[in-house]
């Protein structure tokens, strides 16, 4: 492995301002790693002893029992990492500052849709990993869930940035795809986390930690409709059946590829 990085060393000059410098200031409060999702990710990483976490944010889902290096473009996010978190390099996914096959495994959790060139970023994940690549993403062919009835532009916004699974496969080669159902009490506040807690979407703080909402031009009418439907009971009449299930498949997927 190359020289041990400092906790927030700038590896290269960033070409664009990181999205999370703007929306990530209270990110750690709302985006707590969910242990069930964490177990699924760690299981896929397997026995890899060295791991690079690309688009690492505040450090969710990083293994704690092996050597991990985090890569994150946003200094705002790096500053929210715990004092005992893995060392972080400020760099972009499209230009990882490591030699070929520097790590046993590379991982990227709900981040590839933020990369300015996701294909180049995937090639970088493959370049630096000698044994395994683990990615958590969302399948843009998924039809969405009840939230899109209130904010229909969420699907269009995310489908513009998330690559399809076949597109990813063309870059990484053979890979396994597994469903990642979202628990009803998921602690990691990504877009689908509150599918059984509809009132959460009324919170400014909750929405501020969800990048999709930052892309919508207008949300006030959707918020008012949701607020009124919860007040009158219309939401429960239309969607109350979800309150009886413990987890839901919302299109989140874990992809595993083993470089040749």
Image (spheres, rainbow, N blue to C red):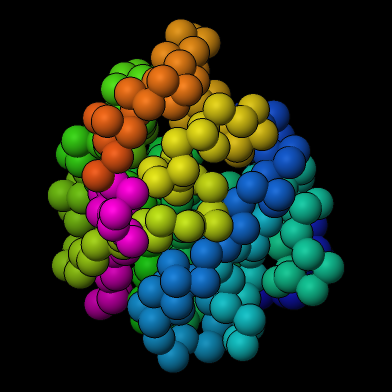
- Residue 130: percent from the left, percent from the top? 40, 79
- Quadrant in the picture for residue 148: top left
Q: Quadrant location of the N terminus?
A: bottom right
Q: Is 165 placed above or below 226 here? A: below
Q: Is 82 placed above or below 73 here? A: below
* In the foreground, 133 or 209: 209
Please give the range of residues in magenta: 242-260
- Residue 121: percent from the left, percent from the top? 43, 50
Q: Is residue 147 magenta?
A: no
Q: Is 135 placed above or below 95 here? A: below
- Residue 62: percent from the left, percent from the top? 58, 71
* In the foreground, 47 or 199: 199
Given the current orientation, which residue lies at the most extreme front position? 232
Query: Residue at left 57%, top 32%?
Result: 207
Query: Residue at left 67%, top 56%?
Result: 58
- Residue 183: percent from the left, percent from the top? 39, 60
Q: Is residue 103 left or right of residue 164?
A: right
Q: Is residue 116 left or right of residue 2?
A: left
- Quadrant in the picture for residue 44: bottom left
Q: Is residue 19 visible?
A: no
Q: Is residue 128 left or right of residue 20?
A: left
């Amino acid at each position: 492995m190359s020289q041990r990085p400092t906790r927030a060393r700038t590896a290269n000059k960033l070409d664009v301002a990181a999205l999370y410098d703007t929306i990530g200031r209270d990110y750690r409060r709302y985006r707590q790693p969910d242990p069930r999702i964490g177990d699924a990710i760690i299981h896929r990483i397997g026995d890899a002893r060295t791991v690079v976490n690309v688009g690492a944010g505040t450090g969710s889902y990083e293994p704690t029992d092996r050597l991990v290096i985090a890569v994150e473009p946003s200094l705002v996010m790096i500053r929210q990492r715990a004092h005992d978190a893995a060392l972080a390099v400020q760099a972009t996914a499209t230009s990882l500052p490591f030699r070929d096959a520097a790590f046993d495994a590379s991982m990227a959790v709900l981040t590839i849709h933020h990369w300015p060139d996701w294909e180049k970023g995937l090639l970088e994940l493959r370049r630096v990993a000698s044994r395994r690549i683990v990615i958590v993403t969302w399948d843009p062919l998924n039809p969405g869930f009840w939230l899109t009835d209130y904010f229909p532009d969420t699907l269009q916004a995310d489908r513009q940035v998330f690559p399809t699974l076949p597109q990813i496969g063309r870059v990484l080669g053979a890979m396994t795809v597994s469903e990642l159902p979202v628990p009803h009490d998921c602690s990691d506040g990504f877009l689908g986390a509150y599918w059984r807690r509809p009132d959460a979407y009324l919170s400014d703080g909750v929405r501020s930690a969800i990048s999709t909402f930052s892309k919508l031009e207008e949300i006030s009418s959707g918020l008012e409709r949701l607020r009124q439907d919860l007040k009158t009971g219309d939401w429960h009449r239309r969607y109350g059946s979800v309150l009886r299930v413990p987890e839901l498949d919302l299109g989140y997927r874990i992809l595993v590829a083993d470089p040749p």
